[in-house]
Image (tube, rainbow, N blue to C red):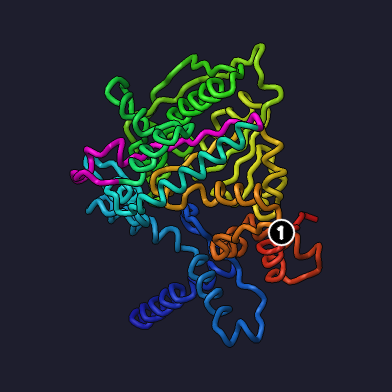
Amino acid sequence: MKRVDHKKGLLIALLIVLAFPLITGLFSIQIGTKLHRSKEAQPPDEITMSSWFNGSWQDQVVSYVNDHIGCFPLFVKIHNQLEYFFFGNIHTRDIIKGKENYLFENTYVNALYGKDEIDDSIVVNNTRKLRQLQDTLNSLGKPLIFCMAANKAVYFSELLPKVTSANTNYSKYLREFERQNVNHIDCNGWFLDMKDSLDHALFPQFGIHWSHFAGILVADTVSNKYEELAGWNLPELEISEKSYSTKPKFDDNDIATSMNLFTTPDPRPLIYPRYSWLSDNSDKKDKKLLMIGDSFMWELFKRSGIGSNCFKEQEFWYYNQTIHKTHQVDSLPMLTRHINTIEKIEEFDAVLIVSNGPNLPQFTWDFVKNTLNLLNNSSYAPEERNNAYLKSQCYGNGKWRAVIENQANKRNIPIDSMVSVYLHDKHYKRL
C-alpha cells in the first residue's frame, strides 16, 4: 500500500512539474525579479492567414511564452550568478573583462585598437562639411560645438592587452578638427590629463559611459566653450559638495545591472557632487540648446541641468533619429524625419554634437550632410535610417507599442498600418 502511495505521490509531483510552466503562464505568476533586457517579447499579433503560413505568428508565440514562463527570470539569474561566482563568466552581450575586474563593452575596445578604422579621405571630407556647417550656423549667431566623448577603453587602456600604435578614427578626426579649426572638445585628452591628479576615476568600474560626476564636468566645459565662442554670459556651475559612494547611482552601474545577477557587485568608489547653476544676470532666459548625439549625451540631457538651468530649453536628437524633450508628451518619440530640420534649427541658439569613438564611422548620423543638403535644396529628402530597429521597437518596446496601439485605434487602422505611418509618413502627427 505504501508503495502505491509513493507511486501516486511521484505521479502527482511529476504532473505538477510538467504543468508548472502552463500554470505560471496562464496566471501571470512570476518567480524572481524582472530581468533587465534591451527588448521584451510582446504578446503575439492577431493571427492572419499570412502570418500563419509564413510562420511569423508562431515565432511570436514561442518567443512570448518562453519569456513569460514564471521561473524564467529565476532560472536566468541562477545560471548567471553561478557562472559569475565560480568562473567569472559574464553572460551579457559584447562585454569583456579587463584587469582588476573592470568591465568594458567590446565596441569601445575595438575603437581603441583601430579595428573600425575608416579611410583618411572620408575623415577629411566629413570634417570639411562640418566646418562648412559650423560657419553657416555661426553666421546666424548659432555656435556649434563637437564634443568627442571619452572612451573608457582609452581611459583605462592599462587594464587591457597592450595597444600597438593603432591609427584610430578618434586620432584622425582630432588631427583634422585641429587642422580645419572645428570648434571641439577632446574629452579623451582632457580626461587623461586629469587622471593622475584626481583621487577618483571618471569612469565607473562596471559602467559603459562616463560617470555622473564626469558628465557634470563636461556640461560645465561645454557651457564655458559657448561663452568663449559667442561672448554670452551663461550661468556658472558651482559644485558645493562631493561625496564618495560605493553604491552606484543613476547609470553608473549599467553593465553590472545588465548581468542579471541576484546581487550586483559593488564598484570602486565614485564621486557624487551637490551642484547648482548660478544664473544671476545671465543670458539663460532666451537661449535654447539643440543636442545631437549618442548615449553619452543622456547624462547631459537628463541630469546635468545644462538644458534647463544653464540654457532656457533643450531638445535631444538621439542618433539624429528620435526626438526627446524635457517634458515628453508620451513614450513614443517623434522622429527627425517628421520635422522640417531647417525650421527646427532656426528655433535654437546653439548646437551641440556629442559622439564617442565607435560612432565616428557613422559621422553625426548624417546630421551634417542632411542639414547642408537641405540648406542648398529645400526639396532634398534625407534617406530613412534604421527602419528595422525602429520597427522592432514599435512592436518590442512595451511603452512604444502602447502608444502605437492607441494611435491605431484613433485612426481605426491595424497596428501594422500604424507602424508604417509612423515610420514613413513625414507628416505624421499624434492624434
Q: Which residue is mark 1?
A: 426
> Is residue 165 inside the magenta stretch?
yes
Q: Position of residue 55 (x, y in %)?
A: 54, 83
Residue 28 visible somewhere in the drawing: no
Type of the residue with mark 1:
Lys
Residue at the spot x=68%, y=67% of the render? 420
Q: Is residue 360 above or below residue 276?
A: below
Helix, strand or loop status at disc 1: loop
State the residue in front, 283 or 305: 283
Judge left or right: residue 87 versus residue 15: left
Residue 360 visible somewhere in the drawing: yes
- Quarter in which the N terminus is drawn: bottom left
Residue at the spot x=43%, y=19% of the render? 242
Instruction: Give the farthest residue toward the top.
Output: 281
Residue at the spot x=56%, y=79% of the render? 56
Q: Position of residue 310 (x, y in %)?
A: 61, 24
Density class for disc 1 (Cα within 10 Å; few <14, some 14-19, many ≥20) is: some
Q: Quarter of the image holding residue 72?
A: bottom left
Residue at the spot x=51%, y=39% of the render? 131
Q: Is residue 418 above or below residue 133?
A: below
Q: Which residues are magenta?
A: 140-167
State the residue in front, 61 or 194: 194
Q: Quarter of the image holding residue 243?
A: top left
Q: Is residue 61 above or below residue 52?
A: above
Q: Position of residue 176 (x, y in %)?
A: 39, 39
Q: Position of residue 369 (x, y in %)?
A: 55, 50
State the residue in front, 20 or 104: 104
Judge left or right: residue 383 versus residue 285: left
